[in-house]
């Protein structure tokens, strides 16, 4: 999938800041308001598909809503997919149409087909991170992969080392910082022109907004695409649909469950290949998780 054009990013930002989006979250879903947005940031998050045999990077837009006290990180594509599936009957029909369109993709090898399908399919990453919530200096993480789980952890900044290197990104004067965090080495670029100590995912703790961050393997990266200062936009605490609730867990248990799911998926693919009379792929290892300290 290629990066989303800037015009589409701006359109999505405007839609997400509109009364229509607020109405969906309040009227249809009854989500709780927990803060007011001061700065709305959109990042292009790049990563590889789970299986290493698919040699292409996926691009997905993630938002960081920075409020007076709380910030929220989530997938813009997932919100769009939920808006289609869990609102009106007409919206649900559009969701189903996109699914059917994706399933019809033919031609090329399995990698190119998957790339086209992910571009069409509604829905995205099911993880959300709330900083300084439910209390100050803590983080709440929602996951949708294993029957809707949640956990909290202490909000401890990465042990950044600020370097002398500088560069311009999106017209902002940025400075380099590095750290080793939970098994990976990261390089970040931050700008003091936006004096907010925040960034994508769980990254924060620098004297300015994190504009870019990537791990040394290139498996995970985030790059700022745009910023706006919306008027009257709210930060919502999401809840699962259909009366479900997030089940409490802890971070390491959740990560180990996610890793087990990746291994189980490979076993299932190998089993299906054997049933179809095919040879299962050799050395089909999954890409590892962002945080590696679960091992």
Image (cartoon, rainbow, N blue to C red):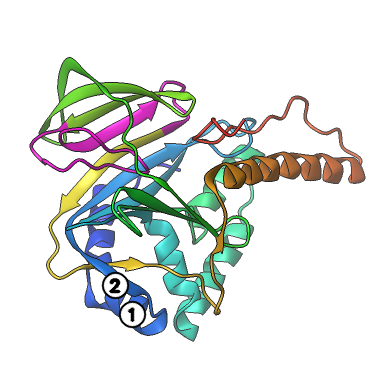
- 280 drawn magenta: no
Q: Could you tell me if residue 26 is visible in this image? A: yes
Q: Residue furthest left?
A: 193
Q: How many marks?
A: 2
Location of residue 80 with respect to 138 vertically, above or below: below
Q: Main secondary structure of the magenta part?
A: loop
- Left or right: residue 214 compared with residue 248: left
- Left or right: residue 24 compared with residue 172: right
Residue ID at (38%, 41%): 45
Location of residue 4 with respect to 76 vertically, above or below: above
- 199 drawn magenta: yes
- In the image, residue 187 lies at what x, y percent? 32, 23
- In the image, residue 103 lies at what x, y percent? 63, 59
Q: What stretch is highlighted in magenta?
A: 191-220
Q: What element carries label 2?
A: strand
- In the image, residue 158 lies at what x, y percent? 33, 31
Precedes in sequence: disc 2 or disc 1? 1
Q: Could you tell me if residue 108 is visible in this image? A: no
Residue ID at (44%, 60%): 78
- Left or right: residue 254 compared with residue 187: right
- In the image, residue 212 lies at what x, y percent? 27, 33
Q: What element carries label 1?
A: helix
The crowd level at tag 1 (other Cα within 10 Å; few <14, some 14-19, many 20+) is some
Location of residue 164 with respect to 278 vertically, above or below: above
Residue ID at (50%, 56%): 120
**Between residues 39 and 70, which one lies in front from this camera angle?**
70
- Which residue is labeled 1 in the image? 26
**Between residues 129 and 106, which one lies in front from this camera angle?**
129
Location of residue 281 with respect to 236 vertically, above or below: above
**Between residues 149 and 98, which one lies in front from this camera angle?**
149
User: CB atoms at circles 2 and 1 under 8 Å apart?
Assistant: yes
Q: Kindly identify which numbered label has been placed on residue 33.
A: 2
């Amino acid at each position: 999938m290629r990066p989303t054009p800037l015009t589409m990013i701006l359109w999505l930002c405007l839609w997400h800041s509109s009364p229509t989006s607020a109405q969906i979250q309040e009227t249809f879903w009854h989500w709780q308001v927990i803060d007011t947005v001061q700065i709305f940031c959109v990042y292009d998050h790049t990563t590889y598909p789970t299986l290493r045999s698919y040699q292409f990077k996926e691009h997905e837009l993630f938002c960081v809503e920075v409020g007076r006290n709380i910030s929220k990180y989530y997938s813009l594509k997932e919100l769009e997919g939920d808006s289609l599936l869990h609102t009106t009957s007409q919206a649900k029909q559009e969701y189903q149409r996109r699914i059917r369109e994706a399933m019809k993709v033919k031609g090329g090898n399995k990698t190119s087909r998957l790339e086209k399908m992910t571009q069409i399919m509604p829905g995205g990453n099911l993880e959300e991170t709330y900083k300084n919530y439910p209390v100050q200096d803590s983080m709440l993480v929602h996951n949708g992969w294993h029957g809707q789980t949640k956990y909290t952890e202490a909000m401890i900044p990465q042990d950044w080392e600020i370097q002398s290197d500088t560069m311009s990104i999106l017209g902002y004067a940025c400075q380099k910082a590095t750290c080793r965090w939970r098994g990976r080495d990261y390089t970040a670029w931050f700008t003091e022109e936006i004096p907010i100590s925040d960034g994508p995912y769980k990254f924060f703790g620098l004297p300015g907004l994190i504009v870019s961050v990537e791990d040394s393997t290139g498996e995970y990266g985030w790059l700022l695409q745009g910023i706006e200062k919306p008027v009257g936009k709210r930060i919502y605490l999401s809840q699962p649909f259909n009366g479900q609730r997030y089940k409490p867990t802890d971070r390491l248990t959740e990560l180990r469950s996610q890793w087990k799911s990746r291994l189980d998926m490979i076993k299932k693919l190998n089993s299906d290949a054997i049933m179809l009379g095919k040879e299962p792929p050799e050395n089909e290892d999954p890409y590892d998780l962002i945080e590696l300290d679960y091992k």
